[in-house]
C-alpha cells in the first residue's frame, strides 16, 4: 500500500474506518501508516462526533473566528489538553446548552465540565448557547476555577460567574492587549 494514498485519503476523510474501507485495508493499518509518517490522527468531530462533540467542535471554530490569532492545539493532537494557544496563553473552550437546574434550583442554567483543564488553562472560555443558537460568553481565569470540577451558570440569577461575562467582540482585543502587557 502506497503511504501517500493513505495520507491523502485521511486528509480528505478524517476517519480511520472510512479510509480503510476506501483503500481496502484495515483501519489499524491506516492508523499505523499515519503514525509512522508523523501524521496527527485527530478525526473530524463535526462530521463524525456525537451531538456534544459537534457542539464543542463548532464552538472551537467560533472561537477561532472571533480570535484569529488563536492556534488550535487539536490540529496537532487528538483531544489536546488545551484547545488553543493565544499569544502564549493557554485557553480551553467549553460549550453548553441551557438545561433545567436541579430541584433546589429550578431555573435554566449552563453546565461546564472543567475537571481536566482547571490546572493547566490560563483561561477557560465558556460559550452558553441559547435556544436560537445565539450565545453568551464567560471568560474564567484558570486560577479561580482550580478547585472546581464543573461550573454552573444560571441564565438569570445571582451566580458569581455572571461577573465574568464578556462580549464576543472583546475576546481578540483582550488577548492582543494581554500579550503586549506580558512582553
Image (cartoon, rainbow, N blue to C red):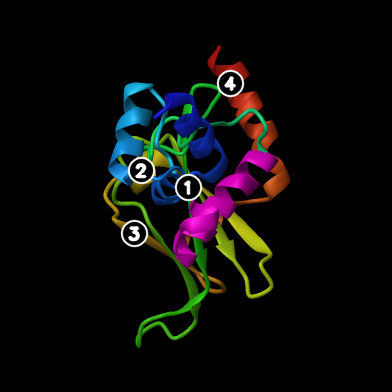
Residue that appears at 48% across and 25% down: 4
Q: Which residue occupies the extreme top position in the image?
A: 183
Lower sequence index among marks 2 and 3:
2
Q: Give the labeled residue for mark 2.
A: 25
Is residue 178 positioned above or below 10 on the image? above
> Marks 3 and 1: which is nearer the front?
1
Per the rendering, the mark at residue 53 is none
> Which image quarter holds the N terminus?
top left
Residue pointed to by mark 4? 179
Proximity of marks 2 and 3: CB atoms separated by less than 8 Å? no
| Mark nearer the viewer, 2 or 4 | 2
User: Can the viewer see residue 164?
Assistant: no
Which residue position holds label 3?
150
Mark-to-mark CA distance, 4 and 1: 46 Å
Query: Would residue 177 be visible to someone looking at this image?
Result: yes
Q: Secondary structure at mark 4?
A: helix
- Left or right: 91 with respect to 31? right
Q: Quadrant of residue 120?
A: top left
The mark that comes first in sequence, 4 or 1, is 1
- Residue designated by label 1: 22
Amino acid at each position: 500500500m502506497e503511504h501517500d494514498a493513505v495520507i491523502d485519503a485521511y486528509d480528505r476523510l478524517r476517519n480511520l474506518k472510512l479510509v480503510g474501507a476506501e483503500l481496502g485495508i484495515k483501519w489499524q493499518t491506516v492508523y499505523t501508516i499515519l503514525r509512522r509518517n508523523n501524521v496527527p490522527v485527530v478525526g473530524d468531530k463535526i462530521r463524525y462526533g456525537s451531538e456534544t462533540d459537534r457542539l464543542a467542535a463548532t464552538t472551537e471554530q467560533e472561537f477561532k473566528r472571533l480570535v484569529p490569532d488563536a492556534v488550535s492545539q487539536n490540529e496537532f493532537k487528538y483531544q489536546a489538553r488545551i484547545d488553543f494557544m493565544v499569544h502564549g496563553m493557554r485557553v480551553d473552550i467549553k460549550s453548553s446548552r441551557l438545561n433545567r437546574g436541579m430541584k433546589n434550583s429550578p431555573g435554566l442554567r449552563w453546565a461546564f465540565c472543567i475537571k481536566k483543564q482547571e490546572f493547566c488553562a490560563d483561561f477557560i472560555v465558556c460559550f452558553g448557547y441559547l435556544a436560537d443558537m445565539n450565545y453568551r460568553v464567560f471568560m474564567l481565569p484558570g486560577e479561580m476555577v482550580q478547585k472546581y470540577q464543573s461550573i454552573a451558570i444560571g441564565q438569570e440569577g445571582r451566580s458569581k460567574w455572571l461577573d465574568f461575562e464578556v462580549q464576543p467582540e472583546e475576546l481578540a482585543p483582550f488577548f492582543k492587549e494581554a500579550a503586549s502587557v506580558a512582553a
